[in-house]
Amino acid sequence: MRDLPDLLVGYLDGLVLGVLSDPLNSASGGQIMVRYDVMDVQADVMVGASVGMAQLSRVGLVMVHRRFTPLVRSRVAWAVGLRLRRERLAAGGDPRVVVTGARPSADLVPDGVEFTAHPVRLREGDTVSPIEVWEVVFPDLVAARELARL
């Protein structure tokens, strides 16, 4: 647990954005996130907004954070998102990743958006706790439609 990334998000519904030093494109070598920003976003548009934000060239990772989600779950989701991003970059794939520590209810999810569970074992001392975090999976068409709404 001590190896989890530090995050300060507060008690809000919002998005945490990993900001890149250079825009995300095929010629860009600077794929290291230099900071993260927290955006206050209404719960009913969070998932759609996260899909749109993931399309921005200076955004490397997006996390949907609900105010009632325990911070440790969001920290785990952020760590999983960082790992997924590194793996996709190494494989030459699209590194855009959207994650969440708590799966949103169906009424908050745009059509076509799905979730993939990532089971994690969280160790603190001799105690191991299984938890699940989620990746937001969006088809290209949904991503383009959501981006057009922003």
Image (cartoon, helix red, strand yellow):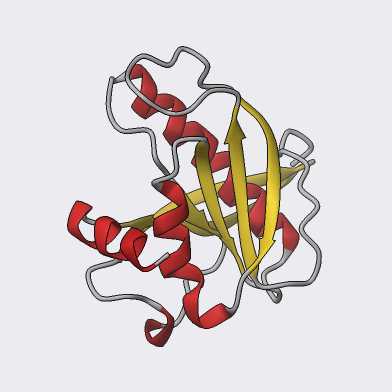
Q: Which residue is drawn at 35% across and 28% down?
A: 88
Does 4 appear above or below 109?
above
Residue 115 in view? no
Q: In front here: 128 or 42? A: 42
Work out whether 71 lies above or below 59.
Answer: below
Name the quadrant of the N terminus: top right
Query: What x and y, as percent, mark residue 44?
Result: 50, 82
Viewer-side residue, 144 vs 88: 144
Q: Residue at coordinates 52% horizontally, 49% vertically from top-left?
A: 62
- Residue 137 lies in quadrant: bottom left
Q: Which of 135 and 149 is in front in this view?
A: 149
The answer to whether residue 114 is left or right of residue 51 is left
Nearest to the observer: residue 3 or residue 32: 32
The spot of residue 141 in percent (x, y) is 18, 58
Say which quadrant the C terminus sits in.
Answer: bottom left
Q: In this view, does 7 lie above or below 19?
A: below
- Vertical placement of 25 versus 66: above or below? above
Residue 73 appears left or right of 9:
left
Q: How many marks?
A: 0
Q: Residue at x 70, y 55 (%)?
A: 38
